[in-house]
Image: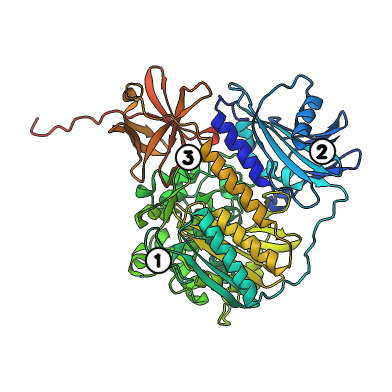
Amino acid sequence: MVHRLIAFVVAALLVGGSTLPAAAQDSSPVANPAAAATTEGVYADPTGRFTVPIPTGWRAETVDGRGVLTDPDGLIVVHALTLEGTDPVAAVGEGWRRVDPAFAREPIDVQEPPPPANVERLAVVTYDGGEASGRVVQGVAQIADGVAYVLLYDADLLTAQRRLSQLSEIDSGFAITGAVEVDLAGVRPATLTPEQFAEFDAFAADLLARTEVPGAAIAVVQDGRIVHSKGFGVREAGRAEPVTPETLMMIGSTTKSMTTMMTATLVDEGKLGWDTPAVELLPGFAVADPVLTPRITVRNLFCACTGVPRRDYEWLFNAEDLSAEDTVASLRDFEFFTPFGEAFQYSNQMVATGGYAAAAASGEPGDLYDAYERAMRGRVLDPIGMTDSTFSFEAVRADDDHATPHGATLTGTYDALSLETETALSPIAPAGALWSSAAEMARYAITELNRGVGPDGNRVVSAENLAVTWEPQVAVDAETGYGLGWLVGEHKGAPLIEHGGNTFGFTSDLAFLPEAGLGIVTLANAQGANLFTVAVRERLLEMAYGQASEVAANVDFYLEQGQQAVADLRLGSEIDPAAVAPFVGDYVNAALGEVSLELTNGALVLDAGEFRTELLPTLNGAGAVAGYITADAPVAGALVALRRENGAPVMVVGAGVDEYDFARALPSPPVLTGAA
């Protein structure tokens, strides 16, 4: 149920309102981040009807018969209770009145997603948190056997963003006592027949058309071999060249697990250890906490457990000027969202630094980027037989079978992008810049399933150190932990290891069942095509285990929600030149660098160098302009505000924890020439 909480935070950002100041955080390291990341306990309903996990650092108590969970800063409160009834929306409202008899907030969104097994109805109700409160308020109710099981969230917006994984842990871990769940642990999946694969392909082709993704490639592996592979759609929208299993696409963050495999080979050789301090490999490495800097290890760089958050804008806006060394250096300015080891915080720069630290230990020549590329080629790609997989854009251009990236616009359509757009990922290459194909990624999946032995029978990495990458280090939700470049969870009780990837114009998904010998890789040439890639994976697992399909209903719901989100966009019809003219000009932010705001032929355009996008006005409930939003791929959907501070124009990009203030750039001094 993670998606509900993401929608809950995003909805609050779009409603607007000021935010409360972030609480001060203790960034003291813990002795064992993996141990500290596990759930400290479980809250049991006094009547015995449900249980709720208590995230690390949280406290739980019983108040007036209901469970109350509070985050370490006291800025998020979650109420858990039951009511008699069969209407989940009414139950949410009644739940809030039980908590606060004066509760009178108005819903801004009501959704009824397909319910999970053993639940008859499910509703998610999001309320207006108040224009000045900076709070997000939501309720979730599940109906089973005439009882409403209710979770109520009242959270400071910034804290909710920082602790989203812990909210997800509560949400996904809420368990109805006595509910019978499907348990596939130890069950062997079937080998699909050609007729079943034909049905599977028909599902994928239909979904590709419904999601309007231009093209995709899928490969299925089982018991050490590729049992099915197929291309769907076209390499570029509007052209005829088909996608094949050999078509090169970017795999985004799925690269992370390959980087940790490369690192594991170095651990095998004793060139570094998982617990080697990062500063021993990268003397210039530092984070904002000087006490923590010498204690962060190679393991910590990959574990998403240090508390260093996602800061993608900071490489996106500076990609043309960033080197690998710059990426490492950027970490010294990042704040910690949560204490070390307490909560899942996903950072591309941290993982990239882990890859560059491994490259430094490898002894490969060149700068950090070149050393990393050589280490990946010599230790992972070539030994597995992934000869066409590459970090080189020149090699991709020279390959006749490569896909074009397609970025999503504000209205959900896809625009073809140039390959150069994707070069922005090069500074964080170990975290997400590999090009590969479904056929070659299938060879990688076989190597993982074979515990480090490649498809040709040669050992690439030891089983022992590969297994370390599968060990959960921090909770992502109640069912999933983050390992070293892997999400480690389950499919209805069957252990599942997976990772997806997103770039400006591609989406990937790789998943395998380590105890069942089954895996699938899906690549798509469209930005944010996770609905397609994950639904394809889930449908394969349903078929392999002979389960009735839940995917179809979920796909229908999310497609409908996507269409509704576009319909609900409150956009102005045109820019008011008089209102925006005083803000036209050059701006600068210490972290994101220089950008410009232009008014061209009636259009307001943000030019960051790495990308250009039109800004469209957004309207509040009264129909007045509330701000602006980026419209064009690959950065559609970012909020932009124009305001004055002390009389000077200021542009704000992003919102909440991802908010960056840009001041008007000072004019350059004149260049004097000639003799004095």
Q: Is residue 112 left or right of residue 405?
A: right
How crowded pointer 3 is (Cα within 10 Å; few <14, some 14-19, many 20+) is rated as some
Residue in the image at 50% along x and 56% along y: 431
What residue would you read off at disc 3?
A: 637
| Residue at the image point whose x is 55% and y is 82% from the top | 456
Residue drawn at the location 52% of the way across and 38% of the way down: 567
Q: Amino acid at mark 2?
A: Thr
Q: CA distance from mark 3 to mark 1?
A: 28 Å
* Residue 354 appears in the picture as rendered: no
Residue 94 visible, this orientation: yes
Amino acid on which the number 1 mark rests in the picture: His
| Depth order, front residue of 602/455 | 602
What's the amino acid at mark 3? Gly
Judge by depth and name the residue closer to the eye, 365 or 314.
314
Query: Tags 3 and 2 in contact by the CB under 8 Å rule?
Result: no
Disc 2 is placed on an element classified as: loop
